[in-house]
Image (cartoon, helix red, strand yellow):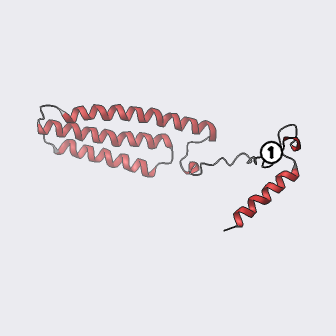
């Protein structure tokens, strides 16, 4: 068998995976596209190992390491995507660009350390929140 057949197939697989990484908005599909690219690399490693008739089969050994690393990467990637989906309700990549929590109001830290002035429920009084917001605006305005 000629080396051109698996090399062309690997190039097509890699280009398809690259298109999937660049064009998709769903994080699961991006992870699948990365796997497709890694499989194209594995195909090239095995094809060149067979073509060169390597006695130690270094390409095939490297392929096994690549498969193990890809499996770990997909496991961690899926765990992250599932955690983000549970917290945000979507795995859309465009929506995940802002990593800050914008749904909940920020709680301001107690600067004076006076726990008696706080509300029993743990919320700040209106005067404290206004003063802290004024300090924050003044700090932003200062170059």
Looking at the picture, how far across and down is residue 50, in whole percent? 15, 35
Looking at the picture, how far across and down is residue 75, in whole percent? 45, 32
Q: Nearer the viewer, residue 97 or 1?
A: 97
Q: Nearer the viewer, residue 53 or 39?
A: 53
Give the answer, above or below, for where 140 lies relative to 126.
below
Q: Is residue 7 left or right of residue 130?
A: left
Crowd rating for badge 1 (residues with CA inside 10 Å; few <14, some 14–19, many 20+): few
Q: Is residue 43 left or right of residue 29?
A: left
Q: Is residue 24 left or right of residue 52?
A: right
Looking at the picture, how far across and down is residue 52, in whole percent? 12, 39
Give the answer, above or below, for where 4 lies relative to 62.
below
Q: In the rendered picture of this protein, how many numbered marks are placed on residues? A: 1
Q: Which residue is located at x 50 percent, y 48 percent?
A: 25
Which secondary structure, mark 1?
loop
Q: Which residue is located at x 84 percent, y 44 percent?
A: 114
* Residue situated furthest bottom in the rendering: 143
Looking at the picture, how far across and down is residue 28, in whole percent? 48, 39
* Residue situated furthest front in the rendering: 113
Quarter that holds the N terminus = top left
Occupied quadrant, residue 56: top left
Residue indicated by mark 1: 113
Q: Which residue is located at x 42 percent, y 39 percent?
A: 32
Q: Is residue 20 left or right of residue 43?
A: right
Quarter that holds the C terminus = bottom right
Occupied quadrant, residue 57: top left
Q: Nearer the viewer, residue 85 or 114?
A: 114
């Amino acid at each position: 068998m000629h080396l051109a057949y698996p090399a062309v197939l690997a190039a097509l697989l890699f280009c398809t995976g690259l298109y999937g990484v660049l064009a998709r908005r769903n994080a699961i599909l991006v992870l699948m596209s990365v796997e497709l690219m890694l499989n194209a690399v594995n195909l090239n490693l095995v094809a060149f190992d067979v073509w060169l008739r390597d006695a130690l089969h270094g390409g095939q050994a490297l392929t096994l390491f690549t498969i193990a690393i890809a499996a770990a990467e997909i496991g961690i990637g899926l765990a992250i995507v599932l955690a983000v989906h549970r917290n945000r309700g979507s795995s859309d990549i465009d929506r995940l660009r802002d990593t800050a929590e914008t749904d909940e109001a920020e709680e301001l830290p107690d600067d004076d350390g006076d726990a008696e002035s706080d509300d029993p429920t743990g919320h700040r009084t209106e005067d404290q929140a206004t003063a802290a917001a004024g300090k924050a605006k003044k700090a932003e305005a200062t170059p």
